[in-house]
Image (cartoon, rainbow, N blue to C red):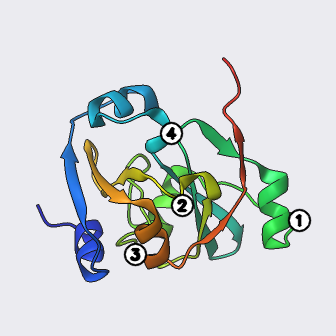
Amino acid sequence: MSSPALTALDTAGLSYRVIRHGPVRSLAEAAAARGVAVPDVVKTIVVRRGEDDHLFVLTPGDRVISWPKLRQLLGVSRMSMPDAAAARAATGYERGTITPFGASTAWPVVADERLRGREITLGAGEHGVAVAVDADAALAALDATVADVTDPEPAR
């Protein structure tokens, strides 16, 4: 399988493992299908700061963006999440497959500090496919800003 995401991982010289798991309906299903804990399923979230100004935020699967923390880190007062069509236009990927690796634009990356020191799984640019990669190596390759930008997932 060749894809923009895998090509970008190869170009960055990162070691990774492709995981083909087919369709999943939830983050918990994705974790089970990938054989990892929920926090190791990294959500790649596209955030819009302004007109044609986006960034990727990487969060552990059991956490959500803390908008106050993220706004403070970036020194902005407003941000939003683009709709599915705008996210695809900004990244080249559909929701559920988005990864900063191989995106059509190399937007800045902010990663939650809890990703450090572990193996994580990320979307690989198509549904039902992920990659497992060393988080520290991936964050370095992405030149990510690493900070506390999440809160625990609210109980349902």
Q: Residue at x 31, y 58 (%)?
A: 125
Residue 56 at least partly seen = yes
Please determine whether, in this image, residue 87 is positioned above or below residue 54.
Answer: above
Q: Which residue is mark 3?
A: 104
Helix, strand or loop at label 2? It is: helix
Q: Amino acid at mark 2?
A: Ala
Disc with the residue nearer the chain's start (3 vs 2): 2
Between 12 and 103, the one lying in front of the other is: 12
Tell me if 108 is positioned left or right of 95 in this view: right
Q: Amino acid at mark 3?
A: Ser
Q: Residue at x 27, y 79 (%)?
A: 13
Residue farthest to the front, as pictured: 117
Q: Amino acid at mark 4?
A: Pro
Question: Foreground mark, 3 or 2?
Answer: 3
Distance of label 3 from label 1 (alpha carbons): 27 Å
Disc with the residue nearer the chain's start (2 vs 4): 4
Q: Amino acid at mark 1?
A: Ser
Q: Which residue is mark 4?
A: 39
